[in-house]
Image: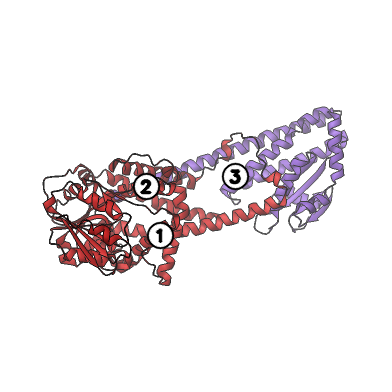
Amino acid sequence: MNGFFEFFISAFLFVGLFFEVFLLLTFFDPEARRRRRTKPNGNFPTVAVIVPCYNEEHTIARTVESLLALEYPKDKLKVVLVNDGSDDTTAQAIDSYSSYANVKIIHKKNGGKYTALNAGIVATKSEFIAVLDADSFVSPEALREIMAHFDHERVGAVIAALSIWNPQSFLEKLQQAEYLLAIAFRHVLSAVNGLYVTPGTLSVFRRQVFEELGTFVLAHNSEDMEIAMRMQKAGWRIVNAPHARVYTKAPETLPKLVRQRTRWMTGLMQNGFDYRDMYGNPRYGALGMLTLPFSTFAVVGIIAVSFLTVIQTGSWLSDFIRNALAVPFSFTFHVSSFSFDWFFLPLNTVVILGALAILILFVRMCAGAILSNTKPSVGMGVVWYVPFYGLVAPVWIIRAVADVVLGIRRSWR
Amino acid sequence: MKPYFRNALLAFVIAAALFGTGFWVSNRINDLRLAELRNIQDRIGTDILSLETQFALLESLSCQNIRENSVLSSELNALAARLAYTENQLGSANEEVEALKRQYSLLEIKDYLLMQRVSEKCGLKPVFVLYFYSNQGDCKKCETAGHVLTYLRETYPQLRVYSFDYHLDLGALETLIAINKIEPRLPAFVINGKVHYEISDLESIEKILPLDKLATSTLKKSADY
């Protein structure tokens, strides 16, 4: 068991290291550097920002205020607030903006997020359509930064760099560290056209994309993943604007975080299955050959490593308890005076490679912080990121796999 | 060549190099561990040989002098801890580990024989425990028994525990097993010539130990000093 465990962990670490090194190398690719250097230009086409709202009474005002504060010509910007049958005070909250000339308000029966987005798309004639979740807030320059990246006619969508809004609690700081990783991750994957999601937290699309491919569909509650896969399949490029800042409210509790991630993971697996012909298909470049296969490997690998770790830990704990019960507690828990002895340092291949992988992960986290101009004040978040996600991520991954296999459908919230 | 493919190729080469380096560093550390084990064994071997020679040369060697040399047992304990750790890291099938275990077992047997003679000459009454275990998966109680013995050894300094892997391919060990008529029912304990089988809990092991002797011995030792 020990040998098999070590072999499996080593293989998993090797693939993980390979992908981390690939990301680091691509970070310095000319295309990535060009994207980092791209500055807002004077090109301001018409944009409609659609905000689907369902029971967002606590955050919608801040979201709308941030949109109204965008540094973008007011006559070129339309804010479309779509109330998707909320049963709280969201309707009143958005109605309070009805006097604004560039704000359009739509009330409709509840039909799900994708129906709200589609209602917004058909209600406008703008050249570009932006989508923004009602619990996310844009920085004033975000839209100008994004529009500068539509520098080729096949760039069909540009996504922003997302951070956690005002991280205070331990859990929020942990998520901030994770989002820093994601900023660098998306920026790098964008350079090789390997993105497979256009997040609801500010993505801007050419209208032509919807005219050519159709609008959003239910897509297992992950319409942002499905539209991205559909675009990639049709040969559209998805690009990341690394300096376009957007902030979102993080789940405040662990159960909420697990629920959110289970939904994401379920969406990834189900949409991945729907678009399975793209996996390992060289026609789709880095997306088909690297990103999608690696995402599957990560899911399978994390489940397997967690399973093996639980078995190993269980066996170790059972031995420890059996031995501890065999002698007086005072002997088992006796702390002898510490004396350093290099002989007993647990330095083996797995530990050394694991430390290296974590080091590269932190380099990527720092790259994300620099890219997004976020103060690296994530403190404990950075330190605790690996152990926390190492323990908790398997929970939502296994839960998502179980949902997919057993056909369990969970509600959005 | 597409940029992503070039980067992937380069990343594979770098990852392989990093993996190889990690593997090499790990092997180097293990080599250093094995070298240290060999070094300790050589030192103990020399010490035992020296003591045996002294014993042979001077039949009237002072018991005080011998007691000073009894530091050997603590060195053997330190060696045992290191050997167990290395075995855990490299696996019991590792040839180097097996060779070191053979040498260690030989040193134990030599120390056991020498200490028997010393005890006889100097009128000491230590309690010798020969403990036979297996780590081939055929002895579920062995780990607990080993843990209990560690506790007992620390509680009663006069207890001299010698641990042997029952299945180790070593002539001297096979002779020791044959002399004491030890069956493969493990864990097995030989205490002052009597064999006890398949016990691992503290209470049972304490029952087979002459604790009164150990206590007397401890008091006697204190008085001597």
Query: Which amino acid does the dot numbered 1 rest on?
Result: Val
Disc 1 sits on a residue from what chain? A
Q: Which residue does the numbered mark 3 point to in the structure image?
A: B86
**Which tag is nearer the camera, tag 3 or tag 2?**
2
Query: Upstream in the sequence, badge 1 or badge 2?
Result: 2
Disc 3 sits on a residue from what chain? B
Query: Which amino acid does the dot numbered 2 rest on?
Result: Gln
Q: Which residue does the numbered mark 2 point to in the structure image?
A: A176
Q: Which residue does the numbered mark 1 point to in the structure image?
A: A299
**Which tag is nearer the camera, tag 1 or tag 2?**
2
- Disc 2 is placed on an element classified as helix
**Which tag is nearer the camera, tag 1 or tag 3?**
1
Residue B129 pos. (x, y %): 79, 46
Q: Is residue A144 visible?
A: yes
Q: Which of A378 and B126 is in front in this view?
A: A378
- Colour convention: by chain
Q: What colour denotes chain B?
A: purple
* Colour red belongs to chain: A
**Crowdedness near tag 3: few (<14), some (14–19) or many (≥20) residues, C-alpha within 10 Å:** many
Residue B133 pos. (x, y %): 71, 52
